[in-house]
Image (cartoon, rainbow, N blue to C red):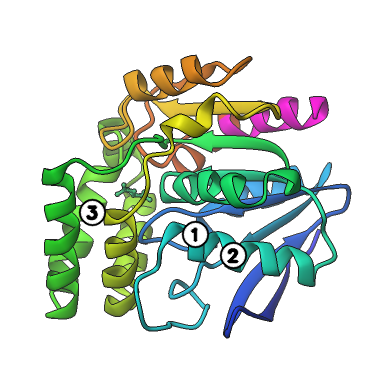
């Protein structure tokens, strides 16, 4: 099946998105500092059962770069407008890492538009003081053009050791994608994450079906945090993906896809 690629004018910028399949709408929200390309395998597989939409968030990939801090709520508004433009009232939101932070913001703002949530390699809490400083420093580093360093550091922390060893092509593709990301988008989104709200109080209000998964080697959203998050959301549990780091959708696509298909068959 062919993936359609198109743009919509959304919230004052051109948003690029991929779309394939028909049925229940599923929005795949990528992480930082990546693009919707990370979902290639999920688009292929899930589109046999669902209408899959994978945008590039503002500033990333083929979407236009805009000025100002990219608050999680801003990304959420962008996605809501994209859904409206596509005639979708209610969707399954699947967010990985920063995509999960955005899914929480979306649920807070537009709960009736959420049919189900899929939370991959993410966590509900806000940044610690040290974490905030790291975000600020990253924004400065991006603005001073240190993209080689940023790409190497980020690619170095995203993957499980076995991925690094056996799938250097995946690591290289992600590293190159980060290197080619707009420094301004990296700075704006980093400052947006720095400012993000604690979504922990939201957890007990979530009543839609929720699937949580995380890699056993995820150092950014570790298994314990995913388990604490599941404990806070009624009826949810964590699927731990073995030999995967922070990018489960790329590192363990078969396992992730089969969990997603099973979940979607039940929502
Ligand atoms: C991501 O993958 O989106 C980022 O690692 C999220 C973060 O830095 O908190």
- Residue 147 left/right relative to 212: left
**Residue 54, percent across and down?**
63, 59
**Quarter of the figure with the N terminus:** bottom right
- At x 45% / y 57%, what residue is drawn? 72
Please give the range of residues in magenta: 256-267
Determine the image quadrant of residue 124.
top left
Check disc 3: other Cα within 10 Å, few if <14, some if 14-19, many if 20+.
Answer: some
- Mark 1 lies on residue: 73
Q: Quick check: can you spot residue 67?
A: yes
- Mark 2 lies on residue: 77
- At x 57% / y 45%, what residue is drawn? 108
Indicate which label's residue lies in the foreground, 3 or 2: 2
Within 8 Å: ligand 1 and the Cβ of disc 3?
Answer: yes
**Quarter of the figure with the C terminus:** top right
Counting every numbered tag in the picture gives 3
Against 158, is 182 above or below?
below
Callout 2 touching callout 1 (CB < 8 Å) = yes
- Marks 3 and 2, how far apart in space? 27 Å
- At x 43% / y 75%, what residue is drawn? 59
- Marks 3 and 1, how far apart in space? 24 Å
Check disc 1: other Cα within 10 Å, few if <14, some if 14-19, many if 20+.
Answer: many
Secondary element under disc 2, as helix, strand or loop, is helix
Against 41, is 125 above or below?
above
- Marks 2 and 1, how far apart in space? 6 Å
Determine the image quadrant of residue 237.
top right
Secondary element under disc 3, as helix, strand or loop, is helix
């Amino acid at each position: 099946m062919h993936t359609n690629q198109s743009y919509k004018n959304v919230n004052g910028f051109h948003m690029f998105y991929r779309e394939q399949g028909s049925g229940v709408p599923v929005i795949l929200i990528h992480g930082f500092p990546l693009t919707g390309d990370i979902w290639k395998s999920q688009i292929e597989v899930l589109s046999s059962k669902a209408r899959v939409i994978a945008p590039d968030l503002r500033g990333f990939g083929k979407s236009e770069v805009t000025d100002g801090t990219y608050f999680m709520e801003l990304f959420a508004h962008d996605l809501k407008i994209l859904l409206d433009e596509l005639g979708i009232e209610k969707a399954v939101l699947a967010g990985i890492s920063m995509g999960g932070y955005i899914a929480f913001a979306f649920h807070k703002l537009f709960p009736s538009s959420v049919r189900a949530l899929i939370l991959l390699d993410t966590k509900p809490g806000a940044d610690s003081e040290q974490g905030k400083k790291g975000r600020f420093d990253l924004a400065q580093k991006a603005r001073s053009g240190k993209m080689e360093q940023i790409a190497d550091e980020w690619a170095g922390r995203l993957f499980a050791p076995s991925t690094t060893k056996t799938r250097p092509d995946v690591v290289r593709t992600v590293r190159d994608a980060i290197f080619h990301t707009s420094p301004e988008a990296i700075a704006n989104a980093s400052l947006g994450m720095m400012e993000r709200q604690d979504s922990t109080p939201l957890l007990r209000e979530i009543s839609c079906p929720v699937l949580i998964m995380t890699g056993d080697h995820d150092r950014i959203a570790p298994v314990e945090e995913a388990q604490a998050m599941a404990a806070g959301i009624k009826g949810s549990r964590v699927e731990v993906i073995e030999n995967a780091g922070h990018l489960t959708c790329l590192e363990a696509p078969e396992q992730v896809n089969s969990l997603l298909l099973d979940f979607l068959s039940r929502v």
